[in-house]
Each structure stands twice: as structure tokens, then as C-alpha cells.
Image (cartoon, helix red, strand yellow):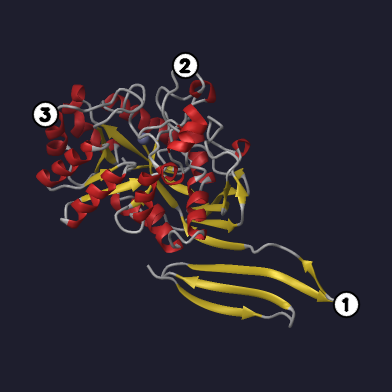
Amino acid sequence: MSVARLPIDIDFSARSQDRAFFCHDGTQIYLIHLIVTVYQENQENLRPIQGRNMTQTIRLPGLADVHTHLRVPGGEHKEDFQTGTAAALAGGVTTVLAMPNTTPPLATETAIAAAYQQAQADTRCQLGLFAGASPAHVDELPRLAPYAVALKIYLNDTFGTLRVEDVPTLRACFQTWPLDKPIAMHAEKQSVAVGIGLAATYNRHVHFCHISRREEIELIADAKMRGLPVTCEVTPHHLFMDVNDAARLGSLADMRPLLGTPDDVAALWEHLNDTVDCVATDHAPHTLAEKRSATPPPGVVGLETSLGLMLTAVSHNRLTLDRLIELMATAPRRLYHLPEQPDTWVDVVLEPTIVRNEALFTKCGWTPFDGVEVAGRVERVTLYGQVVFENGRLLAQPGSGEVIPEM
Ligand SMILES: [Zn+2]
């Protein structure tokens, strides 16, 4: 998608420097309004009478975050569908996909049907569930499919009990999961090679979650070059933090995969404009008390900071705004076959904004990015023609969203 810029200079007086730009991407028109400084002449000199910093407002499509943990069932003291989707809207995210490593996991028909019903009662935006692959319940997979957008297979350790280590379960997943629904994998290091081998063997799409290491992204780049049907996501925390932040923040920056070395982070940026398909947060809330305990669980939140961080990257010319839209809206919808959301958009003010724990809507109430300055903030979210979030105020009611796929 290329954005054609049609500059319209508005010269209110010989001494004003006021410009508006209209950008058109084929479907939406964005107005970017720059007010630099207006000067008033006095006898001796020119002095600013309107010293506002440069302000830009842009309109983005509703973002889709295809990797969140909303903790229902069993972890509702950390997050639930009401608070998780509130955090989503506050972050400009109008579609979330929730992971199945809950308590119990969404690996049985009973568990996923109950979660689906709870989501219908509580969600404030578009929400879809992952079914979880589990050796004990692999025969149930076809019965889970109607409730799920996709299947998640954990090849490596994570929070919770879901893990697949045996080949018969992997074969069953690829043979019985419906072809029109994607398979996502938590795979680290050599497990990425296992996932690529399965994608090639069964000639079906595999999406790799939260790729975080140079060796992994380079292997996926090789697989893509060979034409294999694989895609991948990266998280903002793996792009913006490394092992030094892990040392500084301790358990508050502990997640799976662990933060990488500066060289791993450099590799993710090198591949952000080609190999990487989308940005997803892996929003994984835990309470501060849990994180500060003797056995802190892995995971950090991300729904309310991902857009600001990625806009910071845009302001540093690490990617274009078009590419941000592709990574955070267009591609995730395409990869997961998510329904379009008509009359839905996000108005964003591009101005320096400090991330504050106190301003968060997530139930856990903290982020490892507390105190960090980002390049923009969500001003207003319009979902299906209704304003659902505006200047820090949440307007969407629980249950006003939709659960996908429709049943
Ligand atoms: Zn996750």
C-alpha cells in the first residue's frame, strides 16, 4: 500500500507556518495537521504567541493483536475478558486472539465452550480463542474447532501445562485440525526447524509466535525463500528490550521466550521489513505480587504499549507508517482469516507520551515500560461506527463486542 501525499499549504498570514496534508491509501483519507509556530510581530522582534509543539493526528485501521493471554478461565485475578478487551481498546486494538494456556487449558470441548460463552458476555471488542493441542485430548480437536479461530501448539516451555513433545500428537494435529484454520506454534531455537518440517511435510500454513532469536528469524527467512508456507510474529518487548533490561528489571522482564542479546534484537529489526509478518504483543498479565514472589511466573503485558512503541520506531525511520499498518492490522487479519470490521478506526495523536502504570486498563496494573516515552497516544477508537474509547475514557460496555467465529 503506498500513500500518496497531496500537500495543501494553508497560509493564514505571511507569518504563520501552518500546513495540512491529506494522505490517501485507497480506502481511507488521513488528515495530518501541522502547527509549527505562529509569530506575532512587535516593534523589536518576532516572538511566538502560539508555541505548541508539532501536533499530528493520524487515523489508522483497528489493530489486530493475534497473541494475548486474557487468563479466562482460572486466572481472573490477573485479567479477564472485560479488562483485557478494555486494555485492547485503550491500545487501539479492536481484535484480540486469546491463547489457550488457561486453567484448565482450552484443550477440551467443555473448557473452550465455557470460555466462548464467557467471552460473549464480557468482550468489548472482536475476540477469538485459540484451541490448545494436548496429548491427553488430541482426539477432541475436531470438536474444539467450531469455537476457535486457530490451534496453538506449544513445543517449548511456557506458563501453564500445555506442551506437545511427541510425534503422534503432532501428526494428529496436522491431520485432523481443519485446513481452513491456521496452526500457530510456540517454538524456540531448534523447535522452529521442527515446525518448518511439519509445514513442509503437510504442506500447510504454520505461524510462529514471538520469534526472538537471530538463528530463528534467519531460519524462517530461509524457509520463506524456499517457498514454504510459514509466517511469524515478533513482540514489541523483544524489539525494544534485551538481556540488559532483563538484568535491570529482574522478574518484571521475565517472559518466554526470554529477552535476547543485542545481536538478537538487531536481527529482528533487520528482518522487520521483510521476513516478519506481523507484530503481536504476547500480552501476558501477572500481578506484581506474583512477579515479586519467590517463584515469579513468566510474562508481561503489552496491549496498551505496542502501538506507541511501534510509532516511536516509525519516528526513528525504522519502518514506515504503511509498514506499521501492515504489521499490526492488515497482515494479522489476513493470516488468521479475521472478518473485516466496517466503520472501525483509531485516531492517534503523534506527540511524546509517557507510559504510566496508573493509566493502564489491564487488571494487573503494571508494565515493564512504565516511565518510557513513546511517540503517540490513542485519542479515540471507533468500532462499528460507535466511539468506544476517547481520551482515556472507556465507553464500550462488557458484551458489546463479538466473539469469532460466529456460532
Ligand atoms: Zn504467549
Query: Which of the marked residues, 2 or 1, is nearer the chain's N terminus?
Result: 1
Q: How far apart are marks 3 and 1 (CA)?
A: 84 Å
- Mark 2 highlights which residue? 294
The residue shown at (52%, 43%) is 304
Query: Along the line of sight, which residue is nearer the eye, 92 or 266?
Result: 266
Residue 55, position as x, y percentages in the image:
63, 62
- Is the C-beta separation of discs 2 and 1 under 8 Å? no
The residue shown at (56%, 32%) is 365
Residue 118, position as x, y percentages in the image:
41, 30
Determine the image quadrant of residue 57.
bottom right
Q: What residue type is labelled 1?
A: Glu
Residue 202, position as x, y percentages in the image:
11, 44
- How packed mark 3 is, by other alpha carbons closer than 10 Å (few <14, some 14-19, many 20 or more), is few
Furthest residue toward bottom: 14
Within 8 Å of ligand 1, the CB of disc 2? no
Ligand 1 sits in which quadrant? top left
Q: How far apart are marks 2 and 1 (CA)?
A: 67 Å
Residue 168 numbered mark, or none: 3
- Mark 1 highlights which residue? 44
* Depicted 176 relative to depicted 317: above or below: above
Query: Along the line of sight, which residue is nearer the eye, 140 or 302?
Result: 302
Query: Which of the marked residues, 3 or 1, is nearer the chain's N terminus?
Result: 1
* Depicted 332 relative to depicted 261: above or below: below
Residue 105 is left or right of residue 350, and the answer is left
Q: Can residue 280 be seen by looking at this rendering?
A: no
The quarter of the rendered structure image containing the N terminus is bottom left
